[in-house]
């Protein structure tokens, strides 16, 4: 079975963010980092080469694959910010409808710039995602 690439690393989050080429993406990354640290009470940690995560949880699929991942996180990629916050929580579709300009994937939220979205709604999405994670994967 393939091993997951997204593992905690010792890379400095401030150094990683400082190296983001696009000044707007860097500033948005710093804003998201501060917001998620405040919301989770967890320090940011690099997961793999490009994901900034907060907290962790252990999962096991029916297939037998298991591992550890961050409870919530984001990546300031070249084209857009990728937030790992979609959980299918109740009311998520309504919050997404109120968010502003974005795209979605299975569990990812894609945003070009934070100025395109309502930050209060983004916080609502993050709170709901964390609550969903807490219900499915209680912290020990």
Image (cartoon, rainbow, N blue to C red):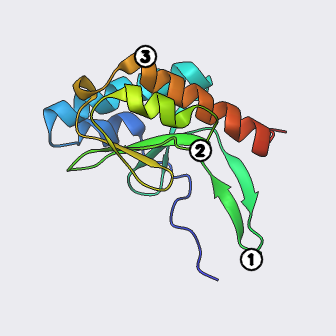
Measured in 3D between alpha carbons, the distance from the residue under mark 1 to the one under mark 2, in whole angstroms, is: 20 Å
Q: Residue furthest bottom?
A: 1
Q: Disc 1 or 3, which lies upstream in sequence? A: 1
Q: Disc 1 or 2, which lies upstream in sequence? A: 1
- Label placed on residue 63: 1
The residue under the point 52% across, 23% down is 124
Look at the image and tell me in which quarter the C terminus lies.
Answer: top right
Q: Disc 2 or 3, which lies upstream in sequence? A: 2
The part of the image, by quadrant, that contains residue 24 is: top left
Q: In the rendered image, which residue does mark 2 sit on?
A: 87
- Depth check: 94 or 13 in front? 94
Q: With respect to residue 13, does 116 lie above or below?
A: above
- The nearer-to-camera label among 1 and 2 is 2
Q: With respect to residue 4, does 26 lie above or below?
A: above
Q: Secondary structure at mark 1?
A: loop
Look at the image and tell me in which quarter the N terminus lies.
Answer: bottom right
Q: In the rendered image, which residue does mark 3 sit on?
A: 120
Across and down, in percent, residue 19 comes to 23, 42
The residue under the point 38% across, 52% down is 50
Across and down, in percent, residue 80 comes to 25, 45
- Depth check: 130 or 29 in front? 130
Measured in 3D between alpha carbons, the distance from the residue under mark 1 to the one under mark 3, in whole angstroms, is: 38 Å
Across and down, in percent, residue 29 comes to 32, 33
């Amino acid at each position: 079975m393939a091993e997951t690439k997204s593992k905690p690393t010792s890379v400095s989050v401030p150094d990683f963010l400082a190296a983001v080429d696009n000044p707007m993406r860097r500033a948005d990354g710093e804003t998201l980092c501060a917001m998620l640290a405040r919301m989770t009470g967890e320090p940011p940690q690099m997961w793999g080469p490009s994901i900034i995560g907060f907290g962790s949880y252990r999962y096991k699929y029916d297939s037998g694959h298991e591992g550890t991942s961050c409870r919530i996180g984001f990546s300031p990629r070249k084209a857009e910010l990728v937030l790992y916050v979609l959980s299918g929580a109740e009311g998520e579709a309504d919050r997404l409808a109120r968010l502003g300009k974005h795209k979605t994937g299975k569990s990812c939220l894609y945003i070009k710039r934070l100025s395109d979205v309502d930050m209060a709604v983004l916080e609502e999405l993050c709170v709901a995602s964390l609550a969903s994670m807490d219900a499915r994967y209680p912290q020990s």
